[in-house]
């Protein structure tokens, strides 16, 4: 989406009907905590009021800030599974599609796919931001969350995935973000979602092209293969 300031409002122009619909739903039906207020919308453009969200960058070194970011994620993640295709099957389809788009060498791809557990049977979709990371958070004595154009029902751990681009999974800040330890099954599920994240970054980066995303995809792969 393209964003510009007009007086007291921010105006966002959607890149597609899908991102427009997802942003509107996120800002209206899925409200949670401090978020922009949708003032008006036409078929391509949203007008947002954000003055009550004025704040600084997220204090990423503070454990308590990560704890609050995790609490927002858990509050937002209400069940919203409206898709007839089970999530486990949808993830397998993403894996097949994004594996092609990533354009990895066969040996490298097989090594990555060898880490895939596929253990998602029976998991239900919940509300997810799907770009949940510090660049979309503001801080002013608490967290405010922005940019809902990717928001959609997805895996309960989806909004943990990009946090691991910023934190080590063994450090205190990540444990504070989670709020409770992951079960062994959840650890495998999170690794699967990180595999999809790596493939998605590589596919996007090579398809557009965008070397920053290719580098990120490579970096995520390196953390998975340690």
Image (cartoon, rainbow, N blue to C red):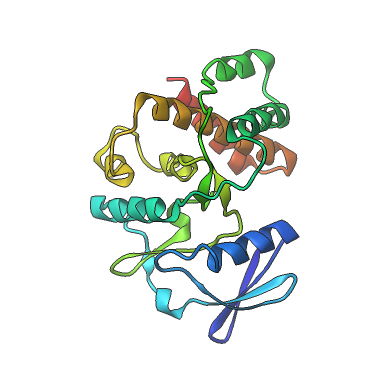
Quarter of the image with the C terminus is: top left
Could you tell me residue 42's position as x and y percent?
A: 72, 76
Task: Judge whether 23 appears above or below 166 on screen.
Answer: below
Write the residue at 75% across / 71% down: 43
**Residue 102 sits in which quadrant?**
top right
Task: Judge whether 198 appears above or below 71 on screen.
Answer: above
Q: Is residue 16 visible?
A: no
Viewer-nearest residue: 151 or 8: 151
Q: Residue furthest bottom?
A: 7
Write the residue at 53% across / 85% down: 8
Report the number of discs: 0
Answer with left or right where residue 150 lies relative to residue 93.
left
Q: Is residue 145 visible?
A: yes
**Residue 196 sits in which quadrant?**
top right
Answer with left or right where residue 44 lies relative to residue 131.
right
Write the residue at 45% across / 51% down: 77
Could you tell me residue 69's position as x and y percent?
A: 35, 54
Could you tell me residue 80's position as x and y percent?
A: 54, 50
Write the residue at 54% across / 67% down: 27
Quarter of the image with the N terminus is: bottom right
Viewer-nearest residue: 27 or 55: 27
């Amino acid at each position: 989406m393209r964003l510009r300031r007009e007086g007291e409002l921010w105006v966002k122009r959607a890149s597609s009907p899908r991102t427009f619909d997802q942003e509107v739903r996120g800002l209206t039906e899925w409200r949670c905590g401090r978020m922009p207020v949708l003032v008006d919308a036409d078929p391509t453009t949203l007008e947002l009021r954000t003055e009550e969200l004025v704040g600084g960058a997220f204090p990423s070194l503070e454990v308590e800030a990560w704890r609050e970011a995790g609490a927002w994620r858990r509050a937002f993640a209400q069940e919203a599974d409206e898709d007839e295709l089970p999530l486990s099957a949808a993830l397998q389809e993403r894996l097949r599609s994004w594996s092609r788009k990533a354009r990895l060498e066969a040996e490298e791809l097989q090594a990555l796919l060898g880490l895939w557990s596929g253990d998602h049977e029976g998991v239900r979709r919940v509300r997810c931001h799907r770009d949940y990371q510090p660049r979309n958070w503001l801080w002013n004595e608490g967290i405010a969350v922005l940019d809902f154009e990717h928001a959609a029902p997805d895996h309960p751990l989806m909004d943990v995935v990009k946090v691991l681009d910023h934190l080590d999974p063994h450090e205190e800040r990540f444990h504070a973000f989670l709020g409770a330890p992951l079960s062994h099954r959840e650890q495998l599920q999170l690794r699967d979602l990180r595999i999809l994240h790596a493939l998605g970054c590589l596919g996007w980066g090579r398809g557009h092209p965008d070397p920053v995303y290719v580098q990120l995809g490579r970096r995520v792969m390196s953390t998975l293969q340690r």
